[in-house]
Amino acid sequence: MRVVLRTIVLGLAAVLMSRVAFAGLGQPTPWQVGLQDSASPVMDHVAWFHDFLLWIITVIAAFVLLLLVIVIVRFNARKNPIPTRTTHNTLLEIAWTVVPVFILLMIFIPSIKLLFHQLNIPPADLTVKATGKQWYWSYSYPDNGQFEFDSLMLKEGERKEGQPRLLAVDNEMVVPVNKTVRVITTGSDVIHSFAVPSFGIKIDAVPGRINETWFTATREGVYYGQCSELCGKDHAFMPIAVHVVSEQAFSAWVDRHSRPGLKRQRRNTLEMKHCRRPGRGGTIDAPMMPRADADCSRATTRRT
Ligand SMILES: [Cu+2]
């Protein structure tokens, strides 16, 4: 019994400490319990609603447990050999109907408010289009230079110090801090889903359809998410990385990417990347991914 108690206490302590010590901003952390730290007003609301529900659930569970204990202790066959034949109690019946209705109303009102907060898109400072493809994301900036680029997961050996495994990408989606970003999503092949936990957003990217969501990042940093719709064999390997930078840094970044020469050069590099696959004894440049717009005609069959 003592061992069980000690295990429970240690487990609870570990859970609490992990929440405090490892609460991650923008990415999951080992032994994480609970939500990732919030970096947007919507996520603040989501986190508040989550904690609010947790209190309600805890009180209900404790109350039901208390009733069970009372029944077990006071009304067992040994202590209560002649059971009562009570069948109705008007006051009790009204109470157990009205109280749950009241609890549901308490949940319903903030829940609907949150839904409206998520779905009512405020006037946006910029729009980013995220296209889900098998198996990477493409981002385009229709009102900032109209450029577009692909964002592929970094493999082992490509990551720099501090970049998380299976989440870091070669080209991050960059947005300015404290600006409202409208994200429009679509899919080019199958249904994907654009989700970034720290911003409290998750929206399907459906071929032939445009969905939209929004966020306002309140802190600079890199925020990671993943495709959240089972979309094929590399579904787990198409992460989302959003780099939130200052307004000046964002303008500089847009300037760099809008230059036509750079745009072309970047596109060529990406096309080569899509045309490359690992082969025996080196890399073979050959068509590899089912990507319709990759021009592999420049890629030569070459062993390195
Ligand atoms: Cu996907």
Image (cartoon, grey):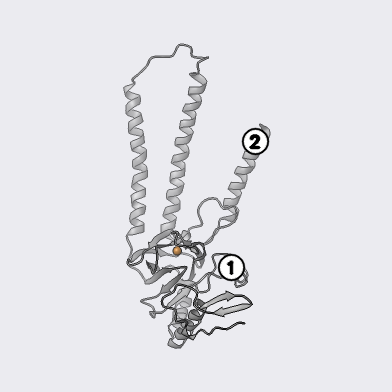
Q: Is residue 209 above or below residue 18?
A: below
| Residue 298 picture location, percent across and down | 48, 86
Crowding at dot 2, Cα within 10 Å, few <14 / some 14-19 / many 20+, comes out as few
Question: Mark 1 = which residue?
Answer: 163
Using the image as rendered, state which of residue 133 and residue 285 is in the foreground.
285
Residue in view at x 56 percent, y 64 percent? 166
Question: Mark 2 = which residue?
Answer: 4
Q: Residue furthest top?
A: 82
Local secondary structure at mark 1: loop
99 on left or right of 231: left
Q: Residue furthest bottom?
A: 261
| Residue 195 picture location, percent across and down | 44, 61
Using the image as rendered, state which of residue 170 and residue 74 is in the foreground.
170
Residue in view at x 60 percent, y 82 percent? 303
Quarter holding residue 127: bottom left
Q: Residue furthest right?
A: 3
Q: Three-letter amino acid code at disc 1?
A: Gln
Q: Three-letter amino acid code at disc 2?
A: Val
- Answer with the quadrant where ligand 1 appears in the image: bottom left
Q: Earlier in the sequence, mark 2 or mark 1?
A: 2
Give the position of the C terminus as an image quadrant.
bottom right
Quarter holding residue 278: bottom right
Please give the label number shown on residue 47: none
Give the position of the N terminus as an image quadrant.
top right
Residue in view at x 35 percent, y 40 percent? 104
Using the image as rendered, state which of residue 163 and residue 109 is in the foreground.
163
Q: CA distance from mark 2 to mark 1?
A: 39 Å
Crowding at dot 1, Cα within 10 Å, few <14 / some 14-19 / many 20+, comes out as few
Q: Confirm if mark 1 falls within 8 A of ligand 1.
A: no
